[in-house]
Structure formats: structure tokens, C-alpha cells
Amino acid sequence: AGFLTSGTANARFYRTYGVPEEKMVRLPFSWGYEQLLLRAQELKPKREELRKSFGIKKDEIVLLYVGRLSKEKRPFNLLEAYSRVSCLNKKLFFVGDGPLRPQLEKYINDLKIKEVYLIGFQPREEVFNFYTLADVLVLPSRDETWGIVVNEAMCFGLPIIASDRIGAAADLVKNGYNGFIFPADDSEKLTSGIKKLIRLSSKERLLFGKRSTEIITEWMDRIDPVYQILKAIEIAKKL
């Protein structure tokens, strides 16, 4: 009878199968982020303290991955790209757990990749701390229907590097504006995106992050839930 669409990529998927526009009801992941924006402001003054607790120096750039350590998320692609970036003041934090953790640990040790930290699963409040201390969120997934961590990281003012197979990327990541989008499974392009963000001045990275917050704030405000509910009711009446 009707189809709930979370964003541009989701609507494109339905159109491919012949679903008409009038049957689509927009239901984006745009609710509940007011509290996250407030939490980001509360934690902002603690950024340096949080960074010091992990031995992060002032000039070091922290790349952050949040999610399961599983095949479809492509954490090995991120590790490979990170190892190719010849920059001494970089760190990579993996927050999350999953079946690939033992292989990742072995890969890191065998190749002697420095400054990579597997933090493991963290309670939600602790994840907020990592968004606060990080400089960039990287999500290299091959299959990711949306990618809620993109929304969350943007509330904390982070630039985003995301693959083009992440649903959120089509709506929330503007290439060269608040981050970079790369073709999924293309480690060279992922490496290039990381290099571009690392080479930005701290002022430019902050601007990218500010734009992320502006984009997610606009995303929250753009949908009128009452209109969408009424549209869904009209579709149901036609059954």
C-alpha cells in the first residue's frame, strides 16, 4: 500500500522496482538528535581532558570508526588505507566489537601498524566521549542501509568520510564540503579522502565539522511529521 523511505538512496531503490512517488512516505532518521546536540555541547569543554586520557597530543589527528567489526563494514579497508597515509601525527580508534576482531589484531601486529586502538564495545555514553575526542569519522561499509553513526558524529561536529554504499552519505555528506565520499571497496580512494582531511588546517577541519552540524540540524527540521502521517492515512484509505 505504501513505502516508508529513509532518504534519497532508499527512494531510488523503490523507484527501481516501479514504486510511484505518491506511494512513498518520507520517514528519515531525523528524530531524537536534539538531545545529542545538547550532549555534544556539554562534552565539548572536556575534549582536551578526554584526549589526554588516551595519550592524544594536541596536534594529533584522530580517525574514528564506530560499529561492528564485521565483513560488510570493511574495517580492513580502513586499516589498509590508514597504513598508506604517511603522517606521523595520526591515530585510529575502532569503537565496537565483532567476529573480525582477532584477524584485525593479527593484521595490526603482523604489519606493525602504529597508533591503532581496538577499544571494543562501549556503552552509549562512552561512545559520545569518542565522538568528542575524535577529528574525523570514517565509515567504509560495503553494505549499510543508512549508517546512524553518521548522524550521531555530525551532531558532535565531525567531518565524515563515507563509502557510496552508505544510505546516509547521499543526504548528509557533501563531497569536499563536510567530508568525502569514496567508492566502496576502493582503498586507494579511501586513502585519498583520509589524506585530504589530514592535510586540511585545523581551522579548515573545524569548518568541515561546523558544516556537518548545520547539515544534521537542517535534516532534523526539514520533515513535517504531521504531513507525513496524513499522507500515510490517505494511502491507507485507498486500499
Image: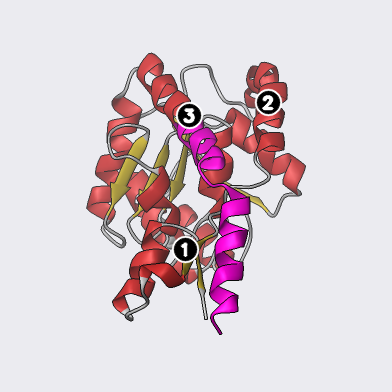
Which of the two discs, 3 and 2, sits closer to the camera? 3
Report the disc number at residue 73: 1
Q: Which sits earlier in the primary sequence, circle 3 or circle 1?
A: 1
The answer to whether marks 3 and 2 mark residues whose Cβ atoms lie closer than 8 Å is: no
Q: Which mark is residue 214?
A: 3
Left/right of residue 190 with respect to residue 45 in the rendered view: left
Q: Which residue is mark 2?
A: 50
Residue bounds of the magenta highlight: 212-239
Say which of marks 2 and 1 sits in front: 1
Residue at (38% x, 74% y) in the render:
14
Neighbourhood count class around disc 2 (C-alpha, 10 Å): few under 14, some 14–19, many 20 upward: some
Point 37% across, 68% down: residue: 21
237 lies left or right of 174: right
Query: Residue 37, labelled with which disc?
Result: none
Residue 165 screen position, x and y as percent = 36, 62
Question: Quick check: is 52 in the magenta stretch?
Answer: no
**On the image, which quarter does residue 74 sit in?**
bottom left
Residue at disc 3, secondary structure: helix
| Residue 164 placement (x, y as % from top left) | 32, 57
- Report helix, strand or loop for mark 2: helix
Mark 3 neighbour density, 10 Å: few (under 14) some (14–19) many (20 or more): some
**105 or 46: nearer the viewer:** 46
- In the rendered view, tell whether residue 141 sits above or below residue 57: below
Q: Main secondary structure of the magenta part?
A: helix
Quadrant of residue 142 within the rendered picture: bottom left
Q: CA distance from mark 2 to mark 1?
A: 27 Å
Task: Determine whether the residue tagged by mark 1 lies in a helix, strand or loop.
Answer: helix
- Answer above or below: position of 173 versus 37: below
